[in-house]
Image (cartoon, rainbow, N blue to C red):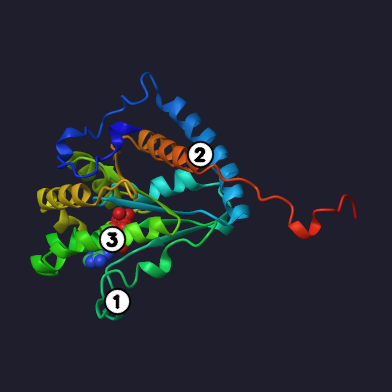
Amino acid sequence: MKEFLVSPGAKVDLGRWDPNDTSAFPGLTKDDGVVMVENARLRLRELQSRLIAQRRHKVLIIFQAMDAGGKDGAVRHVFQGLDPHGLSVVAFKAPTSTELEHDFLWRIHPRVPSRGEITIFNRSHYEDVVAVRVRKLAPREIWERRYEHIVNFERLLADEGTTVLKFFLHIDAAEQKARLQERLRDPSKQWKLQASDLADRTQWAEFIKAYEEALGRTSTVHAPWYVVPSNKKWYRNVVVAHVLREALERLKPEFPPLAPELAGVRSL
Ligand code: ATP
Ligand code: MG
């Protein structure tokens, strides 16, 4: 899925990725896409059974997006049906006063997956170079150093057996406006809307710039970023499910054999 990958070291211009694009799967309709995600989920479930049994690989999936970019929806659609035993979702909100007393990775590290687990980060340490930068919560000399810390941190995770996949769900300002408008209108969605979301909208360009720099400086071979065209929710799900499935297939997880002490046992 090279078209979505941010090449390590590349300068990122998000304008080059069309949020409406669906061309990676030519001719795919919405109905086909829904079936494709269902099939991918069945295969992911099989692969996950092996991951859990083998207790060898760890999988960390990071979602970042502008507000209303569809992180929650992607998690719901792609991961439903997986075994909850081996799966966790962590949503990182604005840091508490205790968290702010520590370095920015302090609250992140304890939440990474252990052997056999898949962990999803809904927002992550990338807030510390995006939200913190745009909202001026720390001076440049603080967040500027964090790119290198992030690359090193993710390298540590990878060296110790973690597969790290990072998805930027890419919507445009018009799509965000429509989704926020819907949150305002629909009583079942109003709880999702905060005054700060409206304030963030006025800083759209600053957020894009901060994301471009973060994606460009932290996409690595060991922890690549994927830019997912996300104006169409069904296509977003197709791309995330596909990239994830390919990554787990590459791990070739296997059920472990019978324990050595049971080697001679044929029946009970
Ligand atoms: P949705 O996209 O559905 O609105 P959400 O992820 O925005 O969900 P919220 O509770 O609305 O969830 O927002 C969490 C807020 O916490 C975001 O505005 C985010 O920027 C902020 N946040 C998370 N981590 C940090 C951080 N390290 N520093 C500053 N702000 C942070
Ligand atoms: Mg929000």
Say which residue label 2 marks: 249
Q: CA distance from mark 3 to mark 2?
A: 26 Å
Task: State the residue at coordinates (33%, 64%).
Answer: 92
Residue 171: x, y in percent?
Answer: 24, 41
In this image, 154 relative to 149: left or right? right
Q: CA distance from mark 2 to mark 1?
A: 36 Å
In this image, 264 relative to 227: left or right? right
Identify which amino acid the numbered label 3 is placed on.
Answer: Asn
Say which residue label 3 marks: 152
Say which residue label 1 marks: 99
User: Where 126 sits versus 44, above or below?
Assistant: below
Residue 112: x, y in percent?
Answer: 42, 63
> Disc 1, ligand 1: is the CB inside 8 Å?
yes
Quarter of the figure with residue 86? bottom right
* Front residue of this view, candidates 12 and 38: 12
Count of residue discs: 3
Label 1 element class: helix
Identify which amino acid the numbered label 2 is placed on.
Answer: Glu
Circle 2 residues within 10 Å: few <14, some 14–19, many ≥20: few
* Dot placed on the residue nearer the N-terminal end, 3 or 1: 1
* Front residue of this view, candidates 234 and 13: 13
Task: State the residue at coordinates (33%, 57%).
Answer: 155
* Dot placed on the residue nearer the N-terminal end, 2 or 1: 1
Label 3 element class: helix
- Residue 195 visible here: no
Label 2 element class: helix
Q: Nearer the viewer, mark 3 or mark 1?
A: 3
Circle 1 residues within 10 Å: few <14, some 14–19, many ≥20: some
Circle 3 residues within 10 Å: few <14, some 14–19, many ≥20: few
Residue 136: x, y in percent?
Answer: 11, 66
Q: CA distance from mark 3 to mark 1?
A: 21 Å
